[in-house]
Image: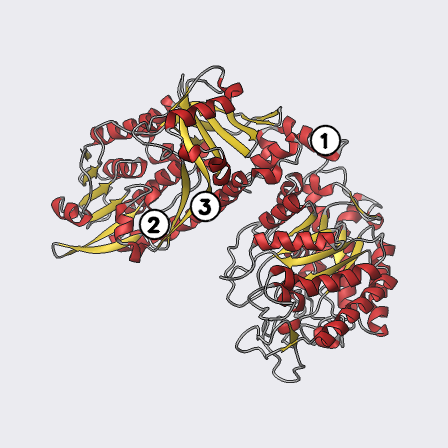
Amino acid sequence: MNSFTPNLRRVLCIGGGPAGLYFALLMKARQPSLEITVIERNRPFDTFGWGVVLSDQTLANLAAADAPTAKLIGNEFHHWDDIQVFFKGGQVRSGGHGFCGIGRKRLLNILQERCLELGVNLVFETDATDDQALAAQYKADLVIASDGLNSRIRQRYAEVYQPDIDLRKCRFVWLGTHQTFDAFTFAFEQTEHGWFQAHAYQFDDKTSTFIVETPEAVWEAHGLDKMEQPEAIAFCEKLFAKYLGGHTLISNATHLRGSANWIRFPRVVCNHWTHRVEVDGRTVPVVLMGDAAHTAHFSIGSGTKLALEDAIDLANEFESGGDIDPVLEAYEARRSVEVLKIQNAARNSTEWFENVPRYTGMEIEQFAYSLLTRSQRISHENLRLRDTQWLGGYEQWLSGGKPVAPMLMPLKVRGLELKNRILVSPMATYSAVDGVPQDFLLVHLGARALGGAAMVMVEMTSPTPEGRITPACTGLYNDTQQAAFQRIVDFVHAQSSARIGMQLGHSGPKGSTQVGWEGTDEPLASGNWPLLSASALAYGEQNQLPAAMTREQMDLMRDQFVASTRRAAEIGFDWLELHCAHGYLLSAFLSPLTNLRTDDYGGSLENRLRYPLEVFRAMRAAWPAERPMSVRISAHDWAPGGNTDADAVEMARAFKEAGADFIDVSSGQTTRAAKPVYGRMYQTPFADRIRNEVGISTIAVGAITDADQANSIIAAGRADLCAIARPHLADPAWTLHEAAKLQSREVDWPKQYLSGRDQMYREIAKQQQLAAALAAAPRAAEEEQ
């Protein structure tokens, strides 16, 4: 108590929602001498909304922050463990999810009552049009802007807070019903114009929230934009009648006219959360909290959670006794990261519901699994903890036999059989001499082939000397290189059950650069060779200017790709991939940021695809029909004016028509201006979209670090294979070890390791030592290619 921030005496909260009320009561409970006022525009105990959802984890946070309030809230909760999904006449139910529902009005009433009990000053029916005047009136040392989604304070100081508001694609309406649900219910119904979905959950003894959602185009096609509320509610009642048990749907927004109660969700992100204003000669911080600072889509039920946890965090920080400014800086730094995590998950969830037709080709079993894991926060093993029996049944359904970890399911592609769904990504090792792979690459790929992965991929290999990224990169354009690769392929085939793939690509404008540990994408200090690209546009100011390819050069390059393809086939590579990503030559044709041509190979996406498709078709014709081919693309340029995932869908569709079996889905690295949004499995949503919209198999790659993530990706149908890079650097036997952690009976140990358990573990230890040595070596692999 004595360590509480000493120069904080009066606090003003503008907005009497969960954030403002909870922060007020927490601060008053921690420091009773504080004068705290909450300003609310509505009447006392007059609130709006249906039910809100909190997880068991959030309840634990509330209990730790203020046990009396948590107990009052907990006594009012309706608790459920199950989620039930209705889709195409079937249903799936899984348990162990641990959620609680409470009426929004009841929640706010509890917080109001607790504030009054502690001595917080609640001022109702006051419209806060001027925060500075109110700060002066109440002599506030701190103003909390908890005035909600449409925050006037955020708008007033927008230049400082720098809000980014993204209106999402679906229209939704909050309704209620006296039909009670014993599980959190998702119901999907198809109409002649598209799909509608309902999110329904009970929050007291006799009432449930019932949210109806659909893409705006479907909403408009049904004329809901022109309907008055009673007519629109009748439409929803008829559509979802089978779930309502004869009960009606109810609106508590009858004051709204027309279709105003159907809204698009606004995703709010603010770059800054604190603004300082001068009030009577004092500097007073105005701090955003709750929906005023950020929003998270209702489909992951985190809006109220974030508001309450904002309040907990800031109250705890003040209790630590620091001065106001450092306290606010720490609050913003910490909470902005936590909010970003939730918002990333919410974005994935939002996009899933915005694109339900993408998944409607699935059977209900996989559709429900995809829904449950849509945010990428709930993983395969997390589902096992929640409902072991259900997940075991799903694994059995997915494998078509006995339950097996999804990443360990075999896969047949054309005439090739892969023993599981894990690949070792192509990774630049910078270990070649004159394009010839050395023993380092034999050890690198050989160790990982023995480590349990279904296939190891060779780093991007050039069909020409000038197409190498660095002088230490591999090539496949002469007999010496072919013989060296033959040795590697023969070793993999003879000593392991793994397959091996070749990735062919030309560096284009990113060639003639230093090896990775000297400077990534930086030009050579001397000995540079001429570069080619789609257009005469340097990758960066420091990079040399490439020449725009002529038609004659394009013909020659196509033929060189074909010649390398034939060499790869002769060697016995099992798989061939064409690299059309990361700003290299063929990627430079695909991106509008790097293709400025005015001929038939520039302009529209159709034109930009023309040359990469020409090269691919020629390679496919030269590659054995029974062996698979994939294409790696950058599914998003992460830069204004660049390709997006919508363009990637069209690219994938074109390559599928040209004979591609897989799309290897990466992103970025096409321009130095790229600003990717990183996170775990951050590129997987692109693979998901391509797979399920185009109907082509995909490889997911990027920030996939454990078996749980790989299992989730495969089981949800987001991709058919997972390419793992850095984990395989640290542990060549990553696949074997991850499978062992799952206690799987499907572990395919190399025969050399089966002479006894002790011998097996000795071999594994040797591999781990080798991996550590390789990771520390100057030739350690630098990046996924």
Between residue 520 and residue 70, name the one nearer to us.
520
Relative horizontal placement of residue 441, taking residue 306 as reference (left or right): right
User: Residue 634 appears at what percent x and percent y?
Assistant: 61, 59
Alpha carbon separation for disc pair 2 and 3 = 17 Å
Q: Amino acid at mark 1?
A: Gln
Q: Residues within 10 Å of mark 3 (few under 14, many from 20)?
A: many
* Residue that appears at 44% across and 40% down: 297
Which tag, 2 or 3, sits closer to the chain's start? 2
Instruction: State the image quarter where residue 516 is shown.
Output: bottom right
Q: Amino acid at mark 3?
A: Gln
Alpha carbon separation for disc pair 1 and 2 = 47 Å
User: Residue 357 appears at what percent x and percent y?
Assistant: 59, 38
Q: Is residue 634 above or below residue 55?
A: below
The residue carrying mark 2 is: 331
Q: Secondary structure at mark 1?
A: helix
The residue carrying mark 1 is: 396
The residue carrying mark 3 is: 343
Asked whether the beta carbons under mark 3 and mark 1 sit within 8 Å of each other, the answer is no
Between residue 290 and residue 213, name the one nearer to us.
213
Residue situated furthest top in the rendering: 246
Q: Residues within 10 Å of mark 2 (few under 14, many from 20)?
A: many
